[in-house]
Image (cartoon, grey):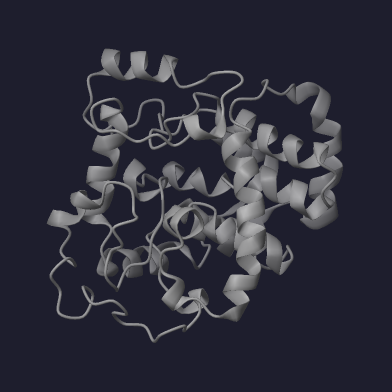
């Protein structure tokens, strides 16, 4: 995620090298197999991002950030205001796109709309990444974006770059390093603390306005170890398993719409003005 004038430089990478890498991220007409290709040599900036993420996303870190942000005490913003802020960002954890964030949101929601899904589903496509406003309050890039995973229990080998957990303080913790850690078998994901980031934050901001299916999509759309590899099934309950079919349905739009044509904001704005007003008040707490 690139943020103008940020003190958190893009992962310590050489800027010219990183910009060259970004130029190649956006392609038309890509197959599904071409997306989410992570290789430390081919994608050095993404690899550096995940090194920082995996070293720092500990159980204690997550609990502290949840306490800081999940009370939603940062003020009120409309959906458009949050989206306009994200227009300054490009996600450094994502090897697949150099679209602005608002273009990605519209690309996702328009693909959902084109397939005839309910309006709440279209809305979910638009708002799913708005939790990235965390960057507005100075959160580091590795603490906002990227794949998510449970903390307080053993890290799965299905997490991208699992070797980068070697310096995480929880790796050899007597409880947090065990299969179930602080949780009970099949306790349900609502009792599990996920690595901190925009998924959990947008869930908290919208949980009083959207249906349960949408909230699962928002809360777990970056939980790739689960919906790509089936990891952590032993923490899930029956509701999770039922709702994850919606997460998987959403995921193909979030991911595979990234090679589509860039949307026209001016033409689409009236439709989204009506859609936002149907589900949200003029502003919501962040």
- Left or right of 78 on screen, residue 200: left
- In the picture shown, does residue 151 fall above or below 78? below
Asked whether residue 206 is in view, the answer is no
Using the image as rendered, state which of residue 89 and residue 37 is in the foreground: 37
Q: Which residue lies at the image location 58% right of the left edge and 46% below the top edge?
A: 130
User: Residue 244: x and y, percent?
Assistant: 60, 64
Q: Which residue lies at the image location 25% right of the left edge and 63% below the top edge?
A: 58
- In the picture shown, does residue 264 fall above or below 173? above
Asked whether residue 158 is in view, the answer is yes
- In the picture shown, does residue 12 fall above or below 15? below
Q: Which residue lies at the image location 65% right of the left edge and 41% below the top edge?
A: 253
Q: Which residue lies at the image location 39% right of the left edge and 87% below the top edge?
A: 184
- Left or right of 245 on screen, residue 154: left
User: Residue 85: x and y, percent?
Assistant: 56, 35
User: Residue 137: x and y, percent?
Assistant: 42, 46
Using the image as rendered, state which of residue 219 and residue 235 is in the foreground: 235
Query: Which image quarter holds the N terminus?
Result: top left
Quadrant of res 255: top right
Quadrant of res 185: bottom left
Query: Which image quarter holds the C terminus?
Result: bottom right
């Amino acid at each position: 995620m690139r943020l103008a004038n940020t003190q958190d430089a893009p992962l310590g990478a050489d800027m010219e090298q990183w910009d060259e890498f970004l130029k190649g991220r956006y392609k038309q007409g890509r197959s599904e197999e071409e997306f989410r290709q992570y290789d430390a040599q081919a994608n050095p900036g993404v690899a550096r991002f995940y090194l920082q993420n995996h070293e720092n996303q500990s159980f204690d870190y997550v609990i502290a950030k949840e306490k800081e942000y999940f009370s939603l005490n940062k003020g009120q913003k409309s959906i458009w205001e949050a989206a306009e802020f994200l227009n300054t960002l490009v996600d450094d954890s994502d090897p697949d796109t150099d679209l602005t964030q608002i273009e990605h949101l519209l690309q996702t929601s328009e693909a959902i709309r084109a397939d005839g899904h309910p309006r709440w589903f279209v809305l979910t496509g638009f708002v799913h990444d708005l939790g990235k406003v965390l960057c507005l309050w100075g959160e580091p890039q590795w603490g906002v974006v990227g794949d998510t995973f449970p903390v307080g229990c053993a890290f799965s080998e299905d997490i991208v770059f699992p070797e980068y957990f070697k310096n995480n303080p929880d790796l050899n913790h007597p409880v947090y390093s065990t299969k179930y850690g602080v949780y009970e078998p099949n306790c349900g994901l609502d009792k599990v603390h996920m690595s901190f980031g925009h998924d959990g934050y947008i869930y908290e901001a919208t949980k009083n306005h959207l249906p349960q299916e949408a909230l699962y999509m928002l809360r777990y759309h970056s939980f790739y170890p689960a919906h790509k590899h089936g990891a952590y099934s032993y923490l899930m309950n029956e509701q999770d398993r039922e709702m994850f079919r919606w997460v998987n349905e959403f995921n193909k739009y979030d991911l595979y719409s990234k090679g589509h044509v860039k949307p026209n904001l001016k033409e689409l704005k009236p439709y989204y003005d009506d859609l936002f007003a149907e589900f949200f008040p003029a502003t919501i707490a962040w």
